[in-house]
Amino acid sequence: MEVDVMKRIPVREQEPKVRAKNFDEVCLGYNQEEAMAEASRCIQCKNPQCVKGCPVSIDIPGFIKEVAQGNPTEAYHVISKYSALPAVCGRVCPQESQCEAKCIRGIKGDAISIGKLERFVADTARENGIKPQAPTEKKGKKVAVIGSGPAGLTCAGDLAKAGYDVTIFEALHKAGGVLSYGIPEFRLPKETVVASEVENVKSLGVKIETNVVIGKAITVDELLEEEGFDAVFIGSGAGLPRFMGIPGENANGVFSANEYLTRSNLMKAFDDNYDTPIIAGKKVAVVGGGNVAMDAARTALRLGADVHIVYRRSEEELPARVEEVHHAKEEGIQFDLLTNPTRILVNDEGNVCGMECIRMELGEPDESGRRRPVEIPGSEFTLDVDTVIMSLGTSPNPLISSTTKGLDVNRRKCIVAEEENGMTTKEGVYAGGDAVTGAATVILAMGAGKAAAKGIDEYLNA
């Protein structure tokens, strides 16, 4: 394959009009020839800035070198030293603002497509039955991990590699956390990619107990005092949705994005073989502009709706990945920017029958540094919708913190933990991911899980 070192090898995708009507994966990924060609563009920097941009510090030049030489198995072993979820990260991490943003090749041309190469390596390993290398020695100590999302799986995987006896406790019936219930099938296939990544963690010796709600079935204190665990990691995520507090939010047809995506993903509302209750809606408004909002909007589109994204700032301020916004637009989702809902209209049957909105303009910057949206008087209008999905962020469920002695939380109900090692205010208890930061990205949760695993290892060996 002829390679222009200044331009990345394009990645094949489903056509927008086709994919808008199915839940198959949008991006088709590289084949080996394409991956080797893209990897050959890497200049193998002596001081690789890409690694500094990776929250889990993968040896990026090392694995790319193996890909370029046609050794995907060796590339997988390089990655798996640092990451428990390479097939996930290759699909959903914001590489464009992390590793790829620091790529030296990107200064004068296109950055190396690090994420797509990671995906190729992980997918090739899965297709050929290659597993991460299991630990050779045991420490004789037990660690409990609460939550099987990206933070929990990463922490558990790293601790297992270090020789600890690890058990994950998951509240739902399926492992994977937000990977299973939050991210749609067309971005992250569940039965192949997520299930395989979970099995890889289990292959290291990690045990997973599902349907266990910590704080109800058993408390953190009981895990430490009665069940013989030497340390606990809390990676329970942030699953408590936020709403606007506007009139009409309790109507039939108003969802949180969490509920809507969970019904579609974990309960398979998208599959005709499953009788899952969900109001698909014919005209849907998704309020919010993050990745979750894009996921909810693109899911509603595939369920047959005409979909609007309603966001109170301009496109420049959209927090979603550029790729996700681009895909949403390609698929026909309409963007009502500089627009804010003020009331949800409800008919006599209690169902949504419209949404009153007002136009906005950007004023002075707020505490986040973004220009504050200000209402334009007299610009009110009504959006014709029958379903509203609120995607305004999430907060941690207070169940664990309220049932654990000595575990401090901040004013946002997030667990207080040290960034460098996950240590909380309770001895032997560590935390990381969305339970500490509030809703963030998969890779940042993984970074927190990795840091906590290191902190737990140091604590148990002190």
Image (cartoon, helix red, strand yellow):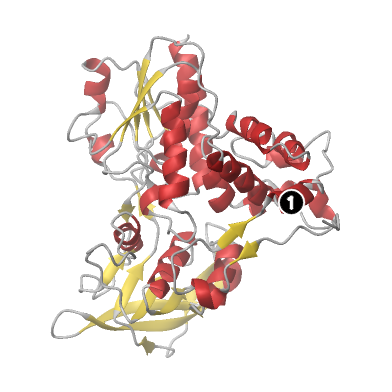
Q: Is 11 above or below relative to 166?
A: below
Q: Left or right: where does residue 328 sit relative to residue 283?
A: right
Q: Left or right: where does residue 95 sit relative to residue 312?
A: right
Badge 1 density bin: few <14, some 14–19, many ≥20, Cα 10 Å: few
Q: Specify whether residue 57 is in view.
A: no
User: Tag 1: residue type?
Assistant: Glu
Whole-percent x, y for residue 303 in the image: 36, 73
For the point 53% across and 36% down, the residue is: 129
For the point 73% across and 33% down, the residue is: 62
Q: SS of the residue at dot 1?
A: helix
Q: Specify whether residue 268 is in view.
A: yes
Quadrant, the N terminus: bottom right
Q: Is 32 above or below relative to 130?
A: below
Whole-percent x, y for residue 405 in the image: 25, 26
The residue at the far left in this view is: 349
Whole-percent x, y for residue 119 in the image: 60, 47
For the point 44% across and 75% down, the residue is: 310
Q: Left or right: where does residue 318 sit relative to residue 78?
A: left
Residue at numbered disc 1? 33
The one nearer the camera, 317 or 145, is 145
The one nearer the camera, 251 or 154, is 154
The residue at the far front in this view is: 128
